[in-house]
Image (cartoon, rainbow, N blue to C red):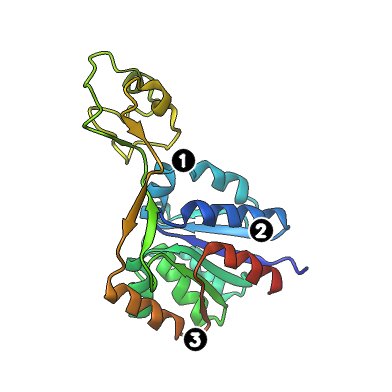
Amino acid sequence: MKKLRIAWGITGAGHYLRESYAVMGELKRDGHSVTTFVSRAGEEVSRMYGLFDDLKVISDGTYLNEIFLDSAQGASFPKIGRFNLKRYDLFVLSPATSNTVAKIVFGIADTLVTNCAAQAMKSDVPCFIVPVDQESDVVSELPYTIDRAKCQNCADCPPRAACPNEAIHGQIDLLKCQGCGSCVELCQHEAISGGDPVPLTIRSVDARNTRMLAEMEHVQVMNRPKLLLEAIRRF
């Protein structure tokens, strides 16, 4: 099997996020190089779900195995030039939010990940993309939350006292939460949970944009991240 140089984009969708990280890990174990490009929202959401530290294993910092954050790349995104230099064999975007899909379809490249997509297409680099909003309704996964009906507003709140990021103050500040989950077992009233399923209705505009994305040159749209593993192993 050919060892590929893969550029992987992550955006701010909770849906398909764990599955995408799992596929990235499998590809790393297969011996492929994986450079991860993370949007600002992708960074925030990955932390909320307790997945961000996994990136340091998948993309260990060696050449073509780096992590590039939108928040640290400036306005010109200099690392995008690697696509023009043919440093990557493949660009994968999973999960892709409806916002990111819409920008790609209408030629807007104002973030790290949308710039990756634009430059990959301009450089004839194949793009495998998994949009979260396709033809059917989906069930997504919530980050950690507090059920107000169960919370007793304890003056001595063990989850609040133990939170390493000081993210709990009557509610969970998801921009501080790192998704460790230690608060769940510490709440004696079982008021904190994470990973609860929530149904989402796909808007017709988002389904339309996904269809338009599938018609773009060099793009292959896939329904699930697990299909990426099969396609890349056949690449």
Q: Is residue 98 left or right of residue 21?
A: left
Of residues 171 and 124, which is closer to you in this image?
171
> What SS does tag 2 mark?
helix
Residue 225 sits in quarter = bottom right
Q: Left or right: where does residue 195 sit relative to residue 54? A: left
Q: Is residue 24 above or below residue 151?
A: below
- Residue designated by label 1: 50
Q: Where is residue 62? Give x, y as percent.
A: 65, 51
Residue kind at label 1, given as amino acid type: Gly
Residue 164 position, x and y percent, is 40, 25
Q: Of marks 1 and 2, which one's residue comes earlier in the chain?
A: 2
Amino acid, disc 3: Glu
The structure residue drawn at horizontal position 61% and vertical position 75%, both measured from the top left corner, is: 86
Q: In which quadrant of the rendered image does the C terminus lie? A: bottom right
For label 3, the SS is loop
Q: Residue at point 53% right, 75% down?
A: 127
Q: Are marks 1 and 2 in contact (CB under 8 Å)?
A: no
Task: Give the residue furthest to the top.
Answer: 156
Quarter of the image with the N terminus in it: bottom right
Distance, label 1 to label 2, CA atoms, is 20 Å
Q: Residues within 10 Å of mark 3 (few under 14, many from 20)?
A: few
For the residues labelled 1 and 3, the Cα–Cα distance comes to 35 Å
Q: Which residue is mark 3?
A: 217
User: Looking at this rendering, what residue extends furthest in the right direction?
Assistant: 1
Position of residue 117 relative to residue 94, above or below, is below
Residue nearer the viewer, 15 or 160 = 15
Name which residue lies at 49% across and 44% down. Answer: 51
Name the image quarter holding residue 140: bottom left
Q: Does residue 65 show up?
A: yes
Q: Which residue is mark 2?
A: 27
Q: Nearer the viewer, residue 15 or 218?
A: 15
